[in-house]
């Protein structure tokens, strides 16, 4: 059904086809409200888009900037002209200079508008101070059409989803076996362990780099997420690292749409017609709450329950897995054995 057909169904059940008590505009708004609530509850339908790094590109990296690198002790500083536009905590990829130990992916600090700095090991003197730099995150903005993230994939490979608390807990565990001593009485703190000495030499999870395996966010409705670990080598950055014209990998985001409203009478909901009756119940619930002589909270509650029943059924059915099907190859998953 399109919006007009749904509205006419609502008007018939309201016994108000002539719009004496409810206007078409009012009922249209009730239908849209019901549709958006249904979408939030069921997390269906879903839309896709690409996450953006920075403000102007959907690529993994932004425009390359050139600068001059200098190293003092364990701190590398790159100077730009004009201002670089980076912020504290940005992840950058440094290439082109020499030696290689100063190149790669780093989290930066921003001492000034024209300089950035990052930690390095004590190494060789610089033989080529001209470097190329581009930002690769770590934070990415989700598409503006998505209200709730359900998954993120990279080149068809779905990424794991983590929270900061999970990674902080894993990082603070410091390797259980090094800190506990097993005896006949069970496990005890190991007073002879020296593992704590090496803790400061291990990379923090925010600074680890390699192939992207997951994303980090703390709320489903977050407007951005962080990649983990940070991409490091060319194979982690480009779709084809050997191509002459390199194309950055892109992060595809799938999620619940921010607004699923119907704009015209000829527009049909993205949800399957199987669930259109839910929108009728949701619109009736709202119509009977209108402040007028027709206000009827009992009828409104009745249609509210019908709406929730349909939404609950949709939540179960639309989250389809191989185990939720009962035909052919999947039939064995539903076999019931009776014992007499």
Image (tube, rainbow, N blue to C red):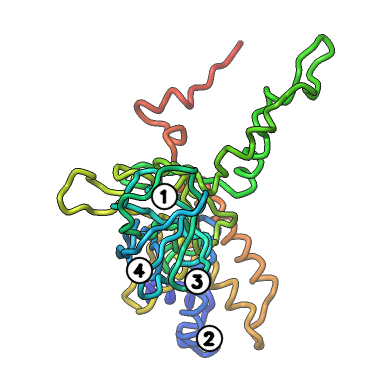
> Residue at horizontal 42%, vertical 76%?
8
Can you tell which quarter of the image residue 294 is in? bottom right
Is 231 displayed left or right of 21 in the figure?
Answer: left
Can you tell which quarter of the image residue 236 is in? top left
Q: Nearer the viewer, residue 75 or 289?
A: 75
Above or below residue 197? Residue 160 is below
Q: Position of residue 241 (x, y in %)?
A: 23, 44
Please tell me whether mark 4 sits on a helix, a strand or a loop: loop
Can you tell which quarter of the image residue 77 is in? bottom left
Label 2 vs label 3, nearer the camera = 3
Q: CA distance from mark 1 to mark 3?
A: 20 Å
Is 238 displayed left or right of 312 in the figure?
Answer: left
Label 1 vs label 4, nearer the camera = 1
Q: Position of residue 283 (x, y in %)?
A: 53, 72
Assess whether mark 3 and mark 4 are in contact (beta carbons under 8 angstroms): no
Please tell me whether mark 1 sits on a helix, a strand or a loop: strand
Q: Position of residue 73 (x, y in %)?
A: 52, 50
> Residue at horizontal 51%, vertical 84%?
26
**Mark 4 surroundings within 10 Å by alpha-carbon count, few (fewer than 14), some (14 through 19), many (20 or more):** some
Residue position marked by numbered label 3 in the rendering? 112
N-term-proximal mark, 1 vs 2: 2
Residue position marked by numbered label 1 in the rendering? 105
Above or below residue 82? Residue 215 is above
Residue position marked by numbered label 2 in the rendering? 22
Q: CA distance from mark 1 to mark 2?
A: 61 Å
Please tell me whether mark 2 sits on a helix, a strand or a loop: loop
Indicate the quadrant containing the C terminus: top left, top right, bottom left or bottom right: top right
Residue 273 seen by the camera: no
Above or below residue 3? Residue 93 is above
Label 2 vs label 4, nearer the camera = 4
Residue position marked by numbered label 4 in the rendering? 268
């Amino acid at each position: 059904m399109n919006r007009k057909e749904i509205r006419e169904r609502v008007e018939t059940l309201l016994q108000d086809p002539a719009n004496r008590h409810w206007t078409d505009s009012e009922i249209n708004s009730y239908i849209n409200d019901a549709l958006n609530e249904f979408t939030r509850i069921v997390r269906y339908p879903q839309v896709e888009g690409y996450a953006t790094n920075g403000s102007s590109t959907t690529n993994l990296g932004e425009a390359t900037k050139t600068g001059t690198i200098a190293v003092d002790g364990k701190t590398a500083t790159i100077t730009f002209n004009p201002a670089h536009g980076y912020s504290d905590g940005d992840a950058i990829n440094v290439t082109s200079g020499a030696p290689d130990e100063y190149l790669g992916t780093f989290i930066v600090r921003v001492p000034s508008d024209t300089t950035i700095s990052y930690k390095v090991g004590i190494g060789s003197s610089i033989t080529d101070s001209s470097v190329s730099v581009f930002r690769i995150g770590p934070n990415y903005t989700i598409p503006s059409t998505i209200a709730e993230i359900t998954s993120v994939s990279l080149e068809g490979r779905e990424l794991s989803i983590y929270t900061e608390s999970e990674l902080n807990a894993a990082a603070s565990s410091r390797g259980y076996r090094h800190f506990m001593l097993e005896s006949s009485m069970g496990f005890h703190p190991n007073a002879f362990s020296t593992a704590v000495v090496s803790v400061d030499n291990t990379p923090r999870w925010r600074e680890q780099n390699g192939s992207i395996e997951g994303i980090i966010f703390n709320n489903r409705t977050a407007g951005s997420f962080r990649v983990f670990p940070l991409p490091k080598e060319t194979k982690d950055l480009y779709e084809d690292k050997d191509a002459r014209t390199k194309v950055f990998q892109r992060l595809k985001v799938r999620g619940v749409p921010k607004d699923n409203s119907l704009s015209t009478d000829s527009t049909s909901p993205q949800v399957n017609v199987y669930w259109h009756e839910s929108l009728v119940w949701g619109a009736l619930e709202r119509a009977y709450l209108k402040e007028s002589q027709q206000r009827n909270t009992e009828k409104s509650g009745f249609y509210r329950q019908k709406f929730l029943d349909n939404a609950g059924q949709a939540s179960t059915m639309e989250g389809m897995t191989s185990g939720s099907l009962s035909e052919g190859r999947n039939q064995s998953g539903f076999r019931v054995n009776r014992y007499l």
